[in-house]
Image: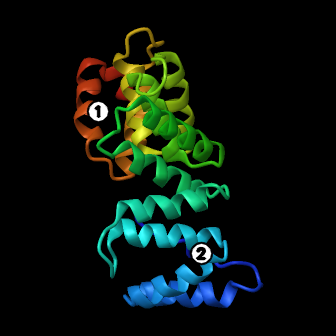
Amino acid sequence: MKFLWVILLAAGLWAGEFESAVADYEQGNYIKALDAFYVLAKEGHPKAQFNVGLIYANGKGVKKDMYQAMAWYKKAAEQNNAQAQYNLAKLISQRPDKEDPRAMKRVKYWYEKAAAGGQKEAVNNLALLYLTGRGVEKNKIKAFELFKKAAKMGDSAAQINVALMYAWGKGIPSNKIKAYKNLKAALLQGRTEASPYLDRLCKENSWACQNN
């Protein structure tokens, strides 16, 4: 939940207003930006709905309000905005009732929607649900397949997760070279937590780390 949608709309009714609101936000005029986004959001503009949710979630110019954030994310999510679907799932999973089976079904539903829309972090988080059995029947093989998919999409967290399964996962076909390559890829993306796993892997299987 770190960014605004800054890709401008094609020429149309909302393009100028949306561009101006993005500019105001980037200049720190959060209230003015929120007012403009709110008008567009009420008219059904999904990216504006997402941005209203984002502003409430981050507390930019307003008091943080996760209920407002979720409400606006949901409006955008229902219009197939993949980032809103992902953010909504994350917020639901962080609520006090997150262990409620009904809540976890909603988390799974929105992660699946976001994953179908190409949101790589959603694919990784969906894999985590299957790995831990939260809201779904535990399925390590399905989790592994989803981690592989997210890792190929470039998600650094998934690269670490799939590497750990390749290197030390029980019931998973061992592949130390793929484990090494995924840990290196994650490290190159700034995931410093991959470093101790990489050191362990190379200490235990030095051949896997040579010329790869």
Give residue 2's mark: none
**Residue type (three-letter) at the residue carrying disc 1:** Leu
Give residue 41's mark: 2
Please state which of residues 51 and 144 is positioned toward the viewer in this rendering. Answer: 51
Crowd band around label 2 with a 10 angstrom C-alpha radius: few (<14), some (14–19), many (20+): many
**Residue at x 48%, y 40% (from the top left corner):** 107
State how far apart marks 2 and 1 are (Cα): 46 Å
Q: Please count the marks in the image.
A: 2
Q: Nearer the viewer, mark 2 or mark 1?
A: 2
Give residue 198's mark: 1
**Residue type (three-letter) at the residue carrying disc 2:** Ala
Rendered view: 194 above or below 74: above
Splitting the image into 4 quarters, where does residue 199 fall?
top left
* Residue 65 locus on image (x, y percent): 34, 66
**Residue at x 48%, y 46% (from the top left corner):** 121
Q: Is residue 31 left or right of residue 72?
A: left
Residue 177 can be seen in this image: no
Q: Is residue 98 left or right of residue 173?
A: left
* Residue 168 locus on image (x, y percent): 34, 17
